[in-house]
Amino acid sequence: MAYIRIPEGRQKLADLVAGAGDVIEVSDAVRILGLDRAPAAKALARWAAQGWLRRIRRGAYVPVTLDTMCSDQVLDDPWILVPRLFTPAYIAGRSAAEHWDLTDQIFNDIVVVTAQSIRQRSARFHGTVFTLKHVQERKIFGTRTVWRRHTKVMVSDLPRTMVDLLDDPSLGGGIQQIADCFTEYLKHKDRNDTLLIEYAERLGNGAVFKRLGLLAGISNEIRLEEACRGRLTKGNVKLDPALDCPKLVTRWRIWIPSGWERRTKP
């Protein structure tokens, strides 16, 4: 029987891809191939130049498969980039809402909440747009770990997803989209109002209770509405800061857009 000899360089690359997982960093090449850091970095750069790897940021690469070698969109699941690019971080907002089936809309970006310092709210890696929000690391809570291919990714759990949408409506695509998500939350098997209130208190933004209380009243969720009433803070806020909100609902100390007055209690 004749055996085909695999070139040493190709074998090293295969060992590296098998041992490193979805995203390959210089430290992976050091650990798996037994190289010093400088030769490891050069090897990754050489394989990238040859088309076997694609660079996603300095010192980090992903394997390129034959069916994607000519494509700008190499990854079929860009969630796997989040731990390497933005840790400590989690998938949030409309992306998490889509994950938990709160919406059937398909979005063109991935929303990430990160404790890393960020220069701008949008970044593009590997053909994917990431919408970023910076928070203090102590505010990263209420998450679950999910496996995406070989990578563990953090995503906000169902109550934290709703709290994030109410805290920053821009993460959800606007207040109407958030209202639709809230309707689905109320029917969801993982609904947990105790955690919802707990997370909102821990986050410490009084606007969350004002928006949540208004939506709970519209949905006739009396217990949830009363829980929000008992935590009402001073000052008026907009239901959606991105919209013109000319009508003040004094009951909730919240300014609402035109057309919303017919939904709310006097």
Image: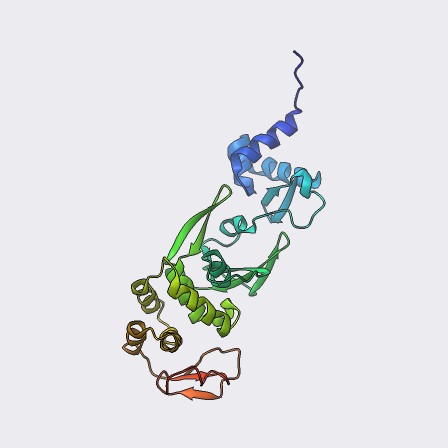
x%, y% of residue 124?
A: 61, 58
Q: Locate residue 248 relative to residue 49 in the image: left or right.
A: left
Residue drawn 65% across and 11% down? 1
Image position of 266 with respect to 113: above or below: below
Is residue 233 visible to us here?
yes
Q: Is residue 30 above or below residue 215?
A: above
Residue at point 60%, 47% (across, down): 75
Residue 263: x %, y % from top left: 43, 81
Left or right of 27? Residue 228 is left
Identify which residue, 122 or 230, lies in the foreground. 230
Question: Residue at the spot x=56%, y=41% of the render?
Answer: 24
Question: Residue 38's spot in the image, x, y percent?
Answer: 59, 38
Q: Is residue 116 visible?
A: no
The quadrant of the rendering that contains the C terminus is bottom left
Q: Position of residue 119 (x, y in %)?
A: 55, 64
Count numbered badges in the picture.
0
Q: Left or right: 220 with respect to 240?
A: left
